Amino acid sequence: MESVRQSKVAKLLQKELAEIFRANSKTLFNNGFITVTIVRVSSDLSSAKIYLSIMATQDVNALFKSINDQKQHIRKILGFSIGKQVRVVPELNFFIDDSYDYAEKINALFNKPI
């Protein structure tokens, strides 16, 4: 079960990372539309799992690799924005959130004629 502190830090990270991805979409992420869908923070607040939904790009995997390559730079920008609110900026681990694609696949199966 997630503590109150974990959920507050997760919401803060989600908000600030969304702003970082929005503000730097042209320069760092080739105009890709990146949405932070879920953030899960470890119990000691030292690491965070961030699930991203990536749209408006030709190659999702290349953009995701670019995000992972720039992980330390993103963490540095995050540190400047939340440094006064948390003691340690968590280690960032990015994952692709494919729940939207999965839901579309299920809908297609339901709408398929018998």
Image (cartoon, rainbow, N blue to C red):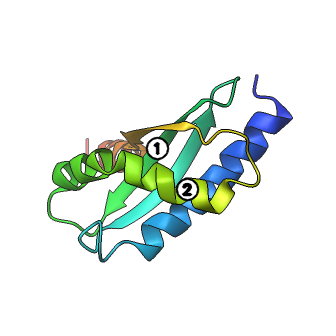
On screen, 108 above or below 1?
Answer: below
56 sits left or right of 104 in the view: left
**Residue beneath disc 1:** 51
Q: Residues within 10 Å of mark 2 (few under 14, many from 20)?
A: some
Which image quadrant: the N terminus?
A: top right
Q: Whole-percent x and y of residue 54?
A: 34, 58
Say which mark, if any, is on residue 78: 2
Residue 96 falls in image quadrant: top left
13 sits left or right of 5 in the view: left
Task: Kindly identify the residue that appears in the image at 26 percent across and 46 percent down.
Answer: 69
68 sits left or right of 16 in the view: left
Q: Whole-percent x and y of residue 86?
A: 73, 45
Residue 86 in view of the camera = yes
Q: Which is in the foreground here, disc 1 or disc 2?
A: 2
Which image quadrant: the C terminus?
A: top left
Residue pushed farthest right? 4
Task: Kindly identify the residue that appears in the image at 52 percent across and 51 percent down.
Answer: 37
> Of 75 and 48, which appears nearest the observer?
75
Q: Secondary structure at mark 2?
A: helix
Task: Kindly identify the residue that appears in the image at 50 percent across and 60 percent down.
Answer: 77
Q: Whole-percent x and y of residue 107?
A: 38, 48
Q: Amino acid at mark 1?
A: Tyr
